[in-house]
Amino acid sequence: MLKLTPCIPWRKSLEDREKSLRRRLIRLELDELSIRLSEAESAFNEATDPLLVEAAILGLASLRARQSYLLKKARLEDR
């Protein structure tokens, strides 16, 4: 018996659109993160109290970790 698989021509374009949307969302988040990193660097540069300096360092580390995650996610999405 011959078994046929259903042909869904719109499925590929739907997958392409979803992938494109995921890429755009990652790009938007990276753009927002770039602004937040700039603000955090300014806060670090202006901090004088040791506790504020430490907080700024931890904030920068957190933002950079998030940036690394998003860049990795973007690379995987391009495959």
Image (cartoon, rainbow, N blue to C red):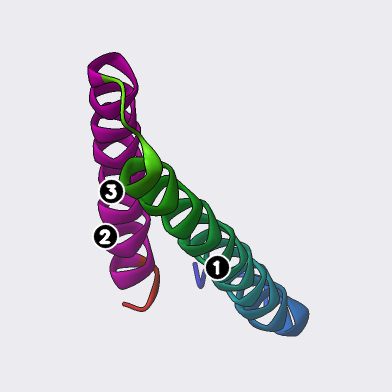
Q: Position of residue 54 (x, y in %)?
A: 23, 23
Residue, far front: 48
Q: Mark 2 points at which residue?
A: 72
Q: Position of residue 6 (x, y in %)?
A: 67, 71
**Dot 1 and dot 3 residues touching (CB under 8 Å):** no
Dot 2, crowdedness within 10 Å: few (<14), some or many (≥20)? few
Give the residue at x 28% y 48%: 64
Q: Mark 1 points at which residue?
A: 31
Q: What stretch is highlighted in magenta?
A: 50-76
Q: Does the magenta stretch include residue 73?
A: yes
Q: Position of residue 58 (x, y in %)?
A: 26, 28
Q: Which amino acid does label 2 sit on?
A: Lys
Q: How far apart are marks 2 and 1 (CA)?
A: 15 Å
Q: With 37 as the anchor, is 21 left or right in this view?
A: right
Q: Which amino acid does label 3 sit on?
A: Arg
Q: Earlier in the sequence, mark 3 or mark 2?
A: 3
Say which quadrant the C terminus sits in.
bottom left
SS under mark 3 = helix
Q: Residue 64 carries which label?
A: 3
Residue 54's place in the image compared with 17, above or below, is: above
